[in-house]
Amino acid sequence: MVNPIKLAVRALLLALLLALPAAAQTPSAIDAQARRILDATRANGLAIAFIDQGRIAHVAAFGKRNANGDPLRSDTVMVGASLTKTVFAWLVLRLVDEGRLDLDRPLASYLQKPLPDYPAYAALADDTRWQIITARHALTHSTGFANFFFLEPDKKPRIHFPPGSRYAYSGEGLHLLQFVLEEGLKLDVGALGRAEFARLGMTRTSFQWRADFAANLADGWNDKGEPQAHDQRSRVRVAGSMDTTIADMAKFAAALVTGNRLSAGARAELSAAQLAITTAHQFPTLAPELPPEDRRDLTAGLGVVNFAGPQGPGFYKGGHDSQTANTLVCLQGSQRCVVILSNDVRAEAGFADLVTAVLGATGVPYAWEYGLGAGKSEP
């Protein structure tokens, strides 16, 4: 007969072990775990980077980059998907540091005419709440917009709740901020990205397609295992158009967690608890809110989601489309991060285990992020 006391002790010891930082992880151990996840999920390709104490400790890639079987490498260009949002938030904070943008000034005040006078936003003419939307609202997903306007029944913009009052994931909120930077401040967001990527040494990252990427490019696979061509984004779309590599994203994660190139104030804003997150799952984006006492573990930062776990506070961002699965997780106290890029959406089902294997127990809200949709082409 199994002794229940021994079982309880074993469970406690296991919990304690999982809660310990995994600072002793070796490159070979990380590689073994990554290969295990590839096998377990039947995914074709996966790349991983580990940041320890704010420094790049390991970068590696495994599997295939295309249906021809060409190897995925650390310099292979992959789809950034919604990790683009975090990189854009970083650029916005750089503009704040330079005094060119105020997070709390209404975005409409930067424009030469009322927002509904621009064709893309004409449907907002009868709702004056557009007048109070700020950059902070856009970066905390609290503009009131749906994720994308094409998801609305009439495919037109609509404000669903008072801006700033709740979290509802919205690529369109970020596109509004991009529009204001380009139309109101006359900034070229693509050029801003190129300049910042150059400063960080991210030589194979861009917000839009570059012809030189073609020689070493990752295609993708959907959840049926069918190969999908890389989407060559000709337009800058800050909600998800970025191409990048795992080597470049390692450099970005190291800068992000340390605050390199940001003022102390801007870096603090990035991961501050800006807004409570009060839904059971991230999708559908306009789901009813839970009572506040039911969800105290998550808050919105600027371009990231904050969580609290066994190793203290951290933040993360995911990226997903029908053939892509990405995640970036950082622990603030130890300045340790994991970045995972996969060109096969099925790998996503193993991300929680892989992050735990590298960092230990963290509290990353993957149940909130994916619900039952991890590794699926459609959420």
Image (tube, rainbow, N blue to C red):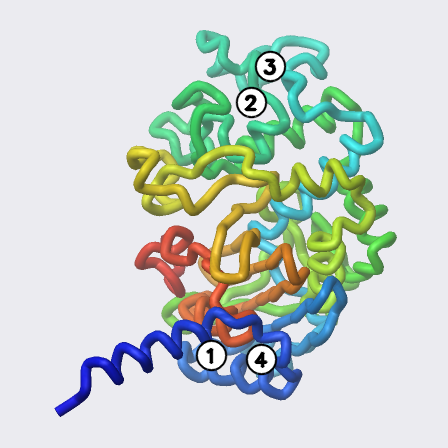
Left or right: residue 359 versus residue 211 is left
User: Amino acid under label 1?
Assistant: Ile
Earlier residue among tags 4 and 3 = 4
Q: Position of residue 202 (x, y in %)?
A: 79, 59
The alpha-carbon separation of the residues under discs 2 and 3 comes to 9 Å
123 over 17 or under it: above or below: above
| Label of residue 357 in the image | none
Left or right: residue 217 versus residue 211 is left
Earlier residue among tags 2 and 4 = 4
* Secondary structure at numbered mark 2: helix
Earlier residue among tags 1 and 4 = 1
| Residue most extreme to the front | 5
| Label of residue 120 in the image | 2
The alpha-carbon separation of the residues under discs 2 and 4 comes to 40 Å
Q: Position of residue 45 (x, y in %)?
A: 55, 76
Q: Nearer the viewer, residue 207 or 94?
A: 94
Which residue was labeled with disc 1?
Answer: 37
Q: Residues within 10 Å of mark 1 (few under 14, many from 20)?
A: many
The alpha-carbon separation of the residues under discs 1 and 4 comes to 14 Å
2 over 192 or under it: above or below: below
Q: Nearer the viewer, residue 16 or 115?
A: 16
Left or right: residue 189 versus residue 225 is right
Residue at image point 39% right, 78% down: 14
Which residue was labeled with disc 4?
Answer: 64
Residue at image point 70% right, 76% down: 58
Residue at image point 47% right, 79% down: 37
